[in-house]
Image (spheres, rainbow, N blue to C red):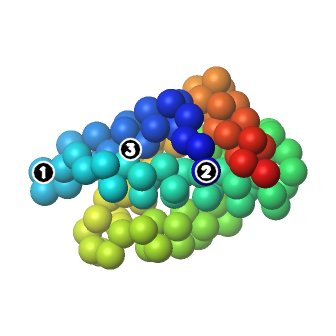
Amino acid sequence: MSKSESVIKIAERVQSHVASKDEKFGFDPMTILAIVNIILTICRIIYECRKNREAVRSGFKQPNLFYRLMLKRAVRKNFKSKQDRENVYAACLDVGATLSEKEISELIQEVEKDK
């Protein structure tokens, strides 16, 4: 699976958001890859279930129960420590709400490209 620069930049934003709250959470390439995997998994799930770009946009901007459950599941699969899971989950929600339309469109294009 190819990772575009925009997805990696979003993952780095999530990672830096977590690192600002927890000084034990540092930069690690495997962490970035895990966050990229989480972001693409959530985007793919929402896109497959809704088949609608607008639903993906609203899922990131105003996450509903379905989005939050899928996010928790994806985070749980990629992080073992409870503290890391909680921090990454909160950071994904915070950063997801601040994504621009261009960044969301690039995420959707990445998901469509991987089909």
Residue found at the very far front of the displayed protein: 1
Q: Is residue 80 left or right of residue 107?
A: left
**Mark 2, other Cα within 10 Å: few <14 / some 14–19 / many ≥20:** few
Q: Helix, strand, or loop for circle 2? A: loop
Q: Nearer the viewer, residue 109 or 91?
A: 109
**Mark 3, other Cα within 10 Å: few <14 / some 14–19 / many ≥20:** many
* Residue 101 quadrant: top right
State if disc 2 and disc 3 touch (CB < 8 Å): no
Q: Position of residue 37 (x, y in %)?
A: 52, 56
Q: Residue at x 33, y 55 (%)?
A: 31
Q: Position of residue 46 (x, y in %)?
A: 73, 56
Residue denoted by label 3: 14
Q: Is residue 32 left or right of residue 53?
A: left
Q: Residue at x 19, y 50 (%)?
A: 26
Question: Which residue type does callout 3 highlight?
Answer: Val
- The CA distance from mark 3 to mark 2 is 20 Å
- The CA distance from mark 3 to mark 1 is 14 Å
Camera-nearest label, 1 or 2: 2
Residue denoted by label 2: 1
Number of marks in picture: 3
* First in residue order: circle 1 vs circle 2: 2
Residue 108: in sight, yes or no?
A: no
* First in residue order: circle 3 vs circle 1: 3
Which of the labelled discs sits on residue 23, or is there none? 1
* First in residue order: circle 3 vs circle 2: 2
Question: Which residue type does callout 2 highlight?
Answer: Met
Q: Position of residue 39 (x, y in %)?
A: 54, 51
Q: Helix, strand, or loop for circle 1? A: loop
Q: Position of residue 28 (x, y in %)?
A: 25, 50
Question: Which residue type does callout 1 highlight?
Answer: Glu
